[in-house]
Image: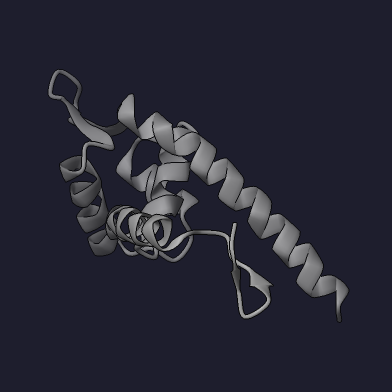
Amino acid sequence: MGELLGKNIAFSELQCNKHLTATEDALYVLGGKWTLRIMIALLSGHTRFNELQRTIKGISARVLSGELKDLEQNGLIKRSVDVKQKPVVVEYVPTEYSKTLKDIISTLADWGQKHKTKITSRV
């Protein structure tokens, strides 16, 4: 770590540029208002459209449909259709790749809880 104007800095210029680029890529996929919420619900075992919509408060059917298509395009979920059942059953299943988000989600949730505690303790 270096110093800038008497302050410690966390990243060198090269590290900064790499982190900015990588973070922009990650936020492109995960940065939407609903994306992480949907992934949390899916990784928690909710796989059907209506079940997801009930679990994720405030999301419209149109938005959920679009988000699910984006997640499928990015390899985070797989759409599974069982035509043998009546009515046809459609499920959205997390891929093995999506499980790489588990640590990110846990870390973000932990930070969010600590932040909330810090902010509410000031009041």
In the image, residue 66 sits, relative to residue 99, either above or below, namely below
The percent position of residue 10, horizontal first and vertical second, equals 57, 60
Name the residue located 16 percent from the left edge and 44 percent from the top edge.
73
Camera-side residue of 120 and 64: 120
Which of the 4 image quarters holds residue 13?
Answer: bottom left
Which of the 4 image quarters holds residue 20?
Answer: bottom left
Camera-side residue of 78 and 112: 112
- Colour scheme: one colour
The percent position of residue 26, horizontal first and vertical second, equals 33, 53
In the image, residue 16 sits, relative to residue 38, either above or below, namely below
Left or right of 47 in this view: 111: right
Left or right of 62 in this view: 19: right
Name the residue located 20 percent from the left edge and 43 percent from the top edge.
74
The percent position of residue 52, horizontal first and vertical second, equals 40, 46
In the image, residue 64 sits, relative to residue 91, either above or below, namely below
User: Quarter of the image containing the C terminus?
Assistant: bottom right
The percent position of residue 53, horizontal first and vertical second, equals 39, 52
Left or right of 90 in this view: 14: right
Camera-side residue of 12 and 18: 12
| Name of the residue lying farthest toward the left | 83
Name the residue located 19 percent from the left edge and 26 percent from the top edge.
86
Name the residue located 44 percent from the left edge and 66 percent from the top edge.
58
User: Quarter of the image containing the N terminus?
Assistant: bottom right
